[in-house]
Image (tube, helix red, strand yellow):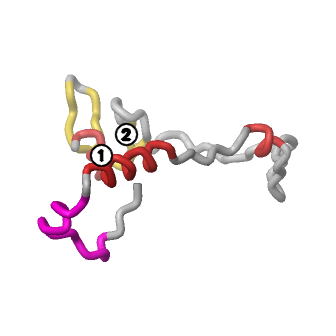
Amino acid sequence: MATDYDTPRKTDDDLNEDSIEELKSRRNDKSASAVDVDEFEQAEGLELPGADLSNEELAVRVLPKQQDEFTCMSCFLVHHRSQLAEEKNGQPICRDCAA
């Protein structure tokens, strides 16, 4: 629920002036509000321009791990040696996973 922080706040006098019936009706109005949900069928017919990648192949040149790199045993990403934080049980751990 969005909150407008620029609106003036109610004082204690304003809160005491609200009747119980008015507060109950506000609560019922809020709970009765409907949520707008998009149906799956509507999105199914929607086609984005250039989105058909079914015939495309991803061509990436993969380099082997270099001597100054290590594989973190927590996230399994290859990092430069400068990112080595510690070794747990002889397993290298990067700075991100150690934090």
Q: In this picture, is 92 found above or below 15? A: above
Of the two numbered discs 2 and 1 in the rendering, the one whose residue sits closer to the viewer: 1
Q: Position of residue 83 (x, y in %)?
A: 30, 49
Q: Quadrant of the C terminus?
A: top left
Q: Which residue shows up at 68% across the image and 45% down it?
A: 38
Q: Which mark is residue 70?
A: 2
11, 83: nearer the viewer: 11
Q: Which residue shows up at 83% across the image and 58% down it?
A: 49
Q: Which residue shows up at 74% across the image and 45% down it?
A: 58
Q: Is residue 10 magenta?
A: yes
Q: Position of residue 17 (x, y in %)?
A: 20, 63
| Span colored in magenta | 5-18
Judge from the rendering whether residue 37 lies leftward or rightward of residue 1; answer left or right.
right
85, 24: nearer the viewer: 24
Q: In this picture, is 28 found above or below 5? A: above
Q: Which residue shows up at 31% across the image and 75% down it?
A: 7
Task: Count all numbered tags in the image, as a single digit.
Answer: 2
Q: Which mark is residue 96?
A: 1
Q: Quadrant of the N terminus?
A: bottom left
Secondary structure of the residue carrying numbered label 1: helix
